[in-house]
Amino acid sequence: MRNLKVFIAYNGAAYHGFQRQDNALTVQEVVEKSIGKLLKIEPPIIYGCSRTDAGVHARRFCFNVRIDSKIPCGGFIKGMNTLLPDDIAVLSCEDAPEDFHARYDTKAKEYVYLINNKPSRDVFLQKLAYHYPYPLDIKKMNEAARLFIGEHDFAGFCRAEGKARVKSTVRTIYALEVTQNKGICEIKIRGNGFLYNMVRIVAGTLIYVSEGKRTLGDVQRAIETGSRDFAGVTLPPEGLYLNEVLYDEPPSDDISGLIRNLDKLHTTEQGEARIRKNIGEDVADVVEWVKTQIKSPSANIGQVGKNYQIETEQYTITVNANSLTIITAHKKRG
């Protein structure tokens, strides 16, 4: 018996989510029937990496399936893509260890929420992006996005009935960024897991911040209290994409530890004097100044060895990742 690890992409507009249901067409049902036709067997059960809702899309969705067949992986890909409808495609296939499970072995997932931010509807993006015709304050949205990074209880960003499905509503967000190019806004979020409707609520909250309906303080209170009242609206499903599923450990530039432990940042007396001299400014509280720089929308944070390195428009700051001691800070040249 072989255990195949398969990545697919699908346009979810015509489906009631991934997971098989008795009274609606789903991606799982279509894929299982296609495997059955290809191998001339009863449709096998496939185990997906996630439950996507009705209308949600996937750029790289993983499932595993156990089959008793010698079909080469290349033949599996070609055969499946012949049998599947135009809105589902097999991207890759490989033999996996017997105990591999697409859902339980996941280390991280990345979602993208796509917004058509042009004044007029784009007929070519219907059911593929959420149309929001009003100006977006990308800077304010990124300021709010930084508050989500780290390990938090996201009960305030989960649909009520979804809380009963999980043992804990605590999740870790590794990265969250908002970008815009030629009228298309992309909200990209990566974490170790997500709650029911969590990404769509986070995206709706960021839009509310842009509109002035929510403040940064409201976002912080939603995280701290778990109250849905401080968060934003749940955006429609058509803008949501499962962008990537990762089975390796989170990348080395994971900054959640730094964001989660900002209150533990400190420096020595000698370090404070060195930093003030390097930046050439009379900073009353070096630690608070560094926290402000880290929270800046322009901050680019990476982990190099045992140190965090924070790059802003004007400064480079180095923090020891183990002790959270601020080692140095200096102005960029030029």
Image (cartoon, helix red, strand yellow):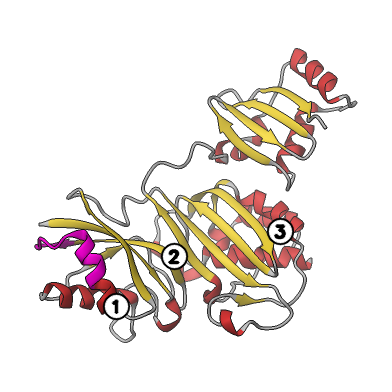
Q: Amino acid at mark 2?
A: Arg
* N-terminal-most mark, 1 or 2: 2
What's under tag 1, amino acid-wise? Leu
Q: Which residue is mark 3?
A: 141
Residue 231: in sight, yes or no?
A: no
Q: Quadrant of residue 187?
A: bottom right
Residue 68 higher or lower than 17, as above or below: above
Residue 78 sits inside the magenta stretch: yes
Q: Residue at x 35, y 71 (%)?
A: 89
Disc marking residue 59: 2
Nearest to the observer: residue 74 or residue 255: 74
Q: Secondary structure at mark 2?
A: strand
Which mark, by number, is residue 17? Answer: none
> How many numbered marks are there?
3
Residue at the disc numbered 1: 84
Q: Which residues are magenta?
A: 66-79
Q: Residues within 10 Å of mark 1 (few under 14, many from 20)?
A: some
Horizontal side, residue 165 vs residue 227: left or right: left
Q: Residue at x 21, y 66 (%)?
A: 76
Q: Is residue 127 left or right of residue 20?
A: right
Name the kind of residue labelled 3 in the image. Met
Give residue 70's quadrant in the image. bottom left
List x then y, in percent, for residue 61. Answer: 38, 63
Residues under numbered marks 1 and 2 in contact, where contact means CB atoms less than 8 Å apart: no
Residue 199 position, x and y percent, is 54, 63
Residue 114 appears in the figure: yes
Residue 60 lies in the magenta stretch: no
Q: Secondary structure at mark 3?
A: helix
Quadrant of res 12: bottom left
Marks 3, 1: nearer the viewer: 1
